[in-house]
Image (tube, rainbow, N blue to C red):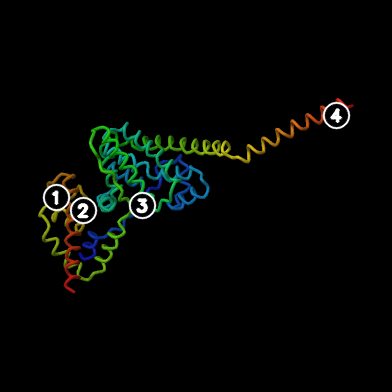
Amino acid sequence: MNDDIKDILSNLNPGIDSATLLLYMQGKLSQEQRHEVEKLLLENDFESEAMDGLAQVKDQQGVSTVIEGLNRDLKVKTTRSRKNKRRRELKEDPLLWVALLIILLLVVLSYVIIHKQLQQG
Amino acid sequence: MIRITSYSLKLVILPNVKAEHYNHMTDADLLDRYASEGNSEWIGVLLERYTLLLFGLCMKYLKNEEEAKDAVQQIFLKVLGEAGKYKIEFFKSWLYMVAKNHCLMGLRGRQGRITREITDWLPLVADEGNISLLLQNENTYAWLEEAMKELDEKQRQCVTLFYLGKQSYFQVSEQTGFSLLQVKSYIQNGKRNLRQTIERKMKESSLKK
């Protein structure tokens, strides 16, 4: 009993993986496993509140589809954000602008020199 | 058996997601990679670990699936915008605070009420310290037994069946006749009361010394 009673005070605060949480929601865990999940939920406010919310979803089987959809959108956002960042970096890079200016000047200068030499010739 | 991870959610249920390749990396590892490379895809991998929790949390407060999905996407954007600005030590706690504040602000907009913003997102290190002190204290067992006697009858019954009887909420509910919500509430409140009583006893004992 002494070891069990200490569980009331312990606060190890580990997370629970989402697959287990989904199985718990769908009632697919044994009573012993349910007890373990519930014990962890008592220690984790984030998970505990999330489970309260997930319990309100009408189509419990459809939750994983919702999560997949959200993750797909997230992937698009992170990829876009990366591309935008790269584009912004290019726009903001002063060295790039200096290099472009130098190339442009060289082209104009070459044109002038070639043009003058052709006239002299 | 139940998988428990030190860094929370692994995306085992979503096979087409690249994130599962990074299951060996902790939240802190992913944040470090993001900080060093500036590649927001690392934050994406990290956020995917918490999509289920975020959706659940938003559902709890907003009580509408479409609104909850929108809120999760807005939280994603917020995190993508904020994550690079400063060093985040405890990502999960920080994300919990960001998400909860977002929902509370949404509710405030909906109800026109003033909602308190939560800023105490850091893990309660002091609290954990207290608990480890309690667990090491030789008087804790005796105090716990005394505190159990001081508990409200319903709380004592549920706490005993849950922690000592190792029963699930459902089993406790069947035995006691309380609803599942009542069982959860009695256990949560009972546990909190026990901690408070024992901490009080510990303080009293140290004052006597």
Have a look at marks 3 and 2 and say if they share a chain. Answer: yes
Q: Amino acid at mark 3?
A: Arg
Is B181 displayed left or right of B14 in the figure?
left
Which residue in the structure is indicated by mark 4?
A117
Give the spatial CA distance, label 3 vs label 1: 28 Å
Distance of mark 4 from mark 3, alpha carbons?
81 Å
- Residue shown at the point (34%, 36%) measured from the top left: B71
B131 versus B186 height, above or below:
below
Distance (Cα) linking label 2 and label 1: 10 Å
* Residue holding disc 2: B167
Q: Which mark is residue B175?
A: 1
Tell me whether the residue at label 3 lies in contact with that at label 2, contact meaning CB atoms closer than 8 angstroms. Answer: no
Is label 2 in contact with label 1 (beta carbons under 8 Å)?
yes
Labels 3 and 2: the sequence-earlier one: 3
Q: Amino acid at mark 2?
A: Gln
Query: Marks 3 and 1: same chain?
Result: yes
Distance, label 1 to label 4, CA atoms, is 105 Å
Which residue appears at 17% of the width and 70% of the height?
B205
Q: Identify the subunit bearing mark 3.
A: B
Dot 4: what SS? helix
* Residue receiving disc 3: B3
Labels 1 and 4 touching (C-beta < 8 A): no
